[in-house]
Image (cartoon, rainbow, N blue to C red):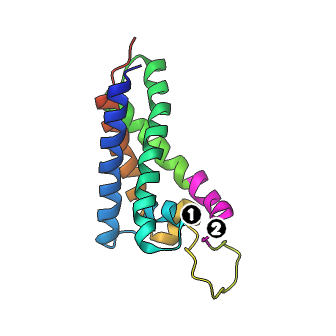
Amino acid sequence: MDALGLVVGALLGTFVMTAVMETAQAARITRISIPFMLGAVVSERRATIRVAGFAMHLLNGLIFALGYALVFELLGRSDWWVGAAAGALHGALALVILLPILQDVHPRMAAEDQGPDPTPMLQPPGFLALNYGKRTPLVTVVAHIVYGAIVATAYRPLG
């Protein structure tokens, strides 16, 4: 396993993916912020949420890159387009499975079927995270495609 390539690709890929998603949020293309969602799991303070969330997102980027490396090793190649395809699948699975489940475990996120609550909470993402805007699925998948392409470009399989 190309550990250095994997770490460099994962960190760079996560930085760029986060930049794409946060830029889309700032441009009002979407309202989703994965670092904010993650950080809100561990804190209620906005100053802490962004820092903790970004650190958690970087850690997730490293962990997911291990799965990408496994795919690259099984295929014996890590072309950018293989990584991009893995990223598209990753983004789709995040939208269809991970984000909808998040509302069940997130301590500060409302549930889809929950009524008004005086406690400030995050809005649940809903199916395909459409509660964060109709272009959220596109932004999410594109950002993950970029992540996958970067991880693949930096990684060199042993085979």
Residue at screen point 45% across, 67% down: 49
Q: Can see residue 32?
A: no
The region drawn magenta spans: 96-109
Percent of width and height locating residue 78: 36, 25
| Residue 29 in the image: above or below residue 54 | below
Percent of width and height locating residue 140: 42, 55
Three-letter amino acid code at disc 1? Val
- Would you say 101 lies left or right of 32 here? right
Is 135 contained in the magenta span? no
Q: Are marks 1 and 2 in contact (CB under 8 Å)?
A: yes
Residue at screen point 34% across, 31% down: 152
Circle 2 residues within 10 Å: few <14, some 14–19, many ≥20 = some
Tag 1 residue: 41
Circle 1 residues within 10 Å: few <14, some 14–19, many ≥20 = some
Q: Which mark is residue 107?
A: 2
Is 103 contained in the magenta span? yes
Percent of width and height locating residue 77: 37, 20
The foreground one among 84 and 62 is 62
Three-letter amino acid code at disc 2? Pro
| Residue 67 in the image: above or below residue 129 | above
